Image (cartoon, helix red, strand yellow):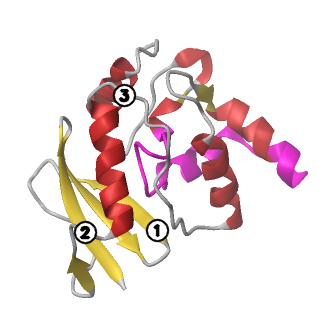
Amino acid sequence: MQYISFFDSPLGKLYLTADDGGLTGIIYENEDGNQLPLNVSDIEFNDEQPDIMDAKLWLSLYFNGGRPDFTPKLSLKGSDFRMDVWDVIKDIPYGKTMTYGEIAKVVEEKRGTRVSAQAVGGAVGHNPVSIIVPCHRVLGAGGAITGYTGGLDKKKFLLDLEEIQYNE
C-alpha cells in the first residue's frame, strides 16, 4: 500500500509518501501549483501512517532549528549505484558538506570501479527523500552551489538554516 500526506514547511508544501517499508519520498509542490508528479490513484491519504508521522516530527524539529537525533525509517528504491550514493549522502552530518567528487571517491572505494562526479550528480538529483537524505549538503568543487530538485532558492535556504558556507 502507498500512503501520502503533506507538511507545510517554510519552503512551501511538502508531500510525504510512504509504503509499508518506510518513507519513500518528500516532494516539493511545484511552483505553478501543480500538486504531484505521480499517479495518486493508488495512494491512500493517511496522516497517521507511522513513517509519515515520524517524518513530520523530524521536519518540525529540523525547521525549528533542531538537530533530530533519529531518522525516520526509509524505503528507498533505486539502482545499486544510486543506493550507494544515497548511503553516502545519508551520512553527511548536519552543518557539513561533501562535493560530488568526494562522494565519487567514497563510492569508488566501495565498488572498486571508477566513478565520475557527473554520475554522482545524476544519482543525487534522483534522491527521492530530500532534506532527510540531505542532498542539499552536496556542493560542487570549491564549495560551489549547484542544482537542486526543489530549486536553488530552497537549497540556499537549507544551507543557511544549517549555517553552511557556500560559493555562488
Identify which amino acid the numbered label 1 is placed on.
Answer: Gly
Give the spatial CA distance, label 3 vs label 1: 22 Å
Give the spatial CA distance, label 2 vs label 3: 23 Å
- The boundaries of the magenta stretch are 108-135
Examine the rendering and report whether any part of residue 127 can be seen. yes
Identify which amino acid the numbered label 2 is placed on.
Answer: Glu
- The percent coordinates of residue 71 (x first, y second) are 49, 48
Residue beneath label 2, please? Answer: 48
**Quadrant in the picture for residue 132:** top left
Give the spatial CA distance, label 1 vs label 2: 13 Å
Q: Are marks 2 and 3 in contact (CB under 8 Å)?
A: no
- Name the residue furthest right: 112
Q: Which mark is residue 77?
A: none
Identify which amino acid the numbered label 3 is placed on.
Answer: Gly
Q: Which mark is residue 22?
A: 1
Relative to 131, residue 122 above or below: below
3 or 1: tag closer to the N-terminus: 1
Residue beneath label 3, please? Answer: 66
110 within the magenta span = yes
